[in-house]
Amino acid sequence: MIEVYVDGASQGNPGLSGAGIYIKAHGKQLEFAEPLGVHTSHKAEFLAAIKALDICMNQYPDEILSFRSDSQIVVDAVEAGYTKNPLFQPLLSEIIEKGNQFPLYFFKWIPSKQNHHADRLAKQAIHKKS
């Protein structure tokens, strides 16, 4: 099972945003800091999950994925398969579509203090852009 920690950050709301992705797989740790452009903090959280799925599709296409996020809105939306917010509906659809290409994937909410690697990377990604 691959552990994927994701976080989105935004400097301003909306503002410059970044995705932080920290992956623990087969005894190795991978780090990704991806600039996202200008978005709200919630949208950055969804985009971070999409970026992580893209990375996993390339590197771990046949693995079980365990996502950890401190974004309650993303975790709740993925677990329910639904969001009321029309801005997030296409992002959630993309997460589900990409996630369904794996044997199994799931999202788990974790406190921010347990997501410090991904948080640091998301903040680094903002500064890459600015």
Image (cartoon, rainbow, N blue to C red):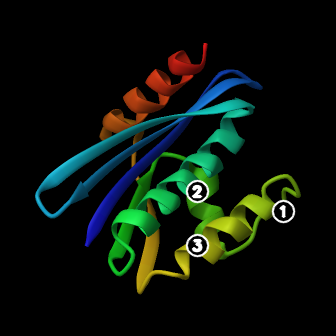
Q: Residue at x 23, y 55 (%)?
A: 24
Q: For label 2, count other residues whose C-alpha is less than 10 Å away and answer few (under 14), some (14-19) or many (20+).
A: many
Q: Position of residue 91 (x, y in %)?
A: 73, 59
In which image quadrant can residue 57 be found?
bottom left
Q: Is residue 34 placed above or below 99 in the rendered structure?
A: above
Q: CA distance from mark 2 to mark 1?
A: 19 Å
Please identify the residue farthest to the front as the structure is shown: 58
User: Helix, strand or loop at disc 1?
Assistant: loop
Please identify the residue farthest to the left as the structure is shown: 27
Give the residue at mark 1.
Answer: 84
User: Helix, strand or loop at disc 2?
Assistant: helix
Q: Is residue 6 left or right of residue 24?
A: right
Q: Is residue 77 placed above or below 16 in the rendered structure?
A: below
In which image quadrant can residue 121 be found?
top left
Query: Amino acid type of disc 1?
Result: Lys
Give the residue at mark 3.
Answer: 98
Q: Residue at x 55, y 47 (%)?
A: 48
Disc 2 + disc 3, Cβ < 8 Å: yes
Quarter holding the C terminus is top right
Q: Is residue 68 left or right of residue 79?
A: left
Query: Amino acid type of disc 2?
Result: Ile
Give the residue at mark 2.
Answer: 50
